[in-house]
Image (cartoon, helix red, strand yellow):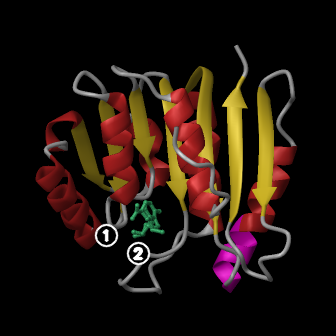
Amino acid sequence: MEAFVLRSARQLAADAQRRILREGDTAVDCTLGNGHDTCYLASLVGETGRVIGFDLQPDAVARTEERLREAGLLERCELRCAGHERIAEFVTRPVRCIVFNLGWLPGGDKSVTTLWPTTRRAVTDALSLLAPMGLLTLCAYPGHAAGEEELRGLRELLASLRPQDFNVLHQRFLNAGPGAPECFLVQRQA
Ligand SMILES: C[S@@+](CC[C@H](N)C(=O)[O-])C[C@H]1O[C@@H](n2cnc3c(N)ncnc32)[C@H](O)[C@@H]1O
């Protein structure tokens, strides 16, 4: 049995993704970046599952495509070079898990970061696309101004959801200092 290690916001999100996703499920990665999350999701949904992914930057889509090809997972994925605020145009059926790893592309242009107005739109649409008991995971990075605004907005938006509709969990490392990444898990009720 694998040892339990309390490591990072991203790890907390990944653990929840692993627990919710089954062979044949559909998942959505709203921020492709370097493709680590997409690869992980693609491995969890198996050969008969599907992962739909979004990123604004062609470079991120190319890096993700390459990573998926190398892992033999590309066939089960559909990558879109489009903002996640357009999720409802491309995802039309309820999905089991939707993932946002906010911020900028590691090793890329820091000026292309996720921004609260578009994140708000995307998260609102993502919530309505979740299947019953489906899960939304979000990692937020408040160590810069746009990230701080996103975190504030997310806290407010998610805290306002009716408990009859969604359960919302907010996790943060209390001793990690200011700007440490935080994780939100949101599960749609039946
Ligand atoms: C922290 S990275 C994602 C990391 C990635 N999930 C991974 O595993 O490597 C954030 C990504 O969000 C992308 N992004 C920024 N604004 C976006 C938007 N409106 N829609 C989709 N992606 C966006 C950036 O281009 C960047 O690649």
Which image quadrant: the C terminus?
A: top right
Q: Is mark 2 within 8 Å of ligand 1?
A: yes
Badge 2 local density, few (<14 within 10 Å), some, or many (20+)?
many
What residue does disc 1 label?
Answer: 57
**Along the horizontal axis of the image, is 13 left or right of 109?**
right
Q: Which of the two discs, 1 and 2, sits closer to the camera?
A: 2
Q: Amino acid at mark 1?
A: Gln
In the image, taking residue 177 as reference, residue 89 lies left or right, namely left
Task: Give whichever of discs 1 and 2 has the lower sequence position.
Answer: 1
Which one is in front, 147 or 37?
Answer: 37
Disc tally is 2
Q: Is residue 148 magenta?
A: yes
| Mark 1–mark 2 CB contact (< 8 Å) | yes
Residue 138 on image: x %, y %: 62, 53
Q: Which residues are magenta?
A: 144-150
- List x then y, in percent, for residue 88: 46, 37
Q: Which residue is mark 2?
A: 105
What secondary structure prevails in the magenta region? helix
The residue nearer to you, when weighing 37 against 57, is 37
- Report ligand 1 position as a quadrant: bottom left
- Residue 119 seen from this side: no
User: Which amino acid type corresponds to the residue marked 2 in the rendered image?
Assistant: Leu
Taking the spot 85% from the left edge, 69% from the top edge, the residue there is: 174
- Label 1 CA crowd tier, 10 Å (few <14, some 14–19, many 20+): some
Residue 77, visible in the rendered structure? yes
